Amino acid sequence: MRVFLAGASGVIGVRLVPPLVATGHLVAGMTRSPGKVDLLRDLGAEPVVCDVFDLQHLARVVTEFGPDVVLHELTDLPDDAAEIRTLGAANSRMRREGTRNLLTAAGAARTVAQSVAWTLGGDGGEAVWDHEEAVLGAGGVVVRYGQFYGPGTYHPSSLPDGPRIHVDEAARRTVPLLTAPSGVVVLVDE
């Protein structure tokens, strides 16, 4: 299967490339950072540098790759969790405009998209709603992850409040969802 992974250099994206490649999928790994090209190539992906907000370029690179599935793992979160409240508008934009652009670029390709398994208030919560409705309206799969913990996350050595899931387990349980029926899947610790 040809998988276009948007957000391939993110905390879960880098964990998704190896099992996707190991199970025989051809993976295009999208990042907006040219400095992540070598990392993605080393993981086994075909690197694609693209900003999801540049719809014309995005549509061209997705069409050229010809994916069977577009795996949407894009976020725009700060490195410091304490800044989420003040910088949340960027992630809300990603959920709205980024998702809309990715769905447009995906065309007939199936879409599997990251979401959250907890309730957000205010505009962040509305953005989650808009994001999930767009994905489900396109016949896609919404994956509601618990809060990630483990190396490279906001919780590298401690357990966050639930719902939660180890980031490596989240990646392992995401790969089979490429062929799941349209709907919502919740991935949290058992």
Image (tube, rainbow, N blue to C red):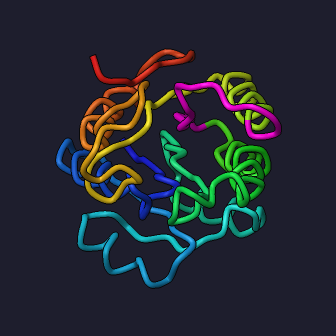
Give the x, y percent position of residue 176.
Answer: 31, 27
Give the x, y percent position of residue 107.
Answer: 68, 42
Would residue 124 be found to the left or right of residue 21 on screen?
right
Where residue 169 sits, quadrant-wise, is: top left
Task: Quadrant for the C terminus, please.
Answer: top left
The residue lying furthest to the bottom in this view is: 35
Give the x, y percent position of residue 165.
Answer: 33, 32
Q: Is residue 114 above or below residue 42?
A: above
Would residue 38 be found to the left or right of residue 106 on screen?
left
Q: Residue at image x 56%, y 15%?
A: 183
Q: Residue at image x 77%, y 52%?
A: 93
Where residue 64 sits, quadrant-wise, is: bottom right
Q: Is residue 143 magenta?
A: no
Q: Residue at image x 44%, y 30%?
A: 146
Is residue 185 or residue 2 the one in the foreground? 185
Specify start and end residues of the magenta stretch as a single range: 109-124
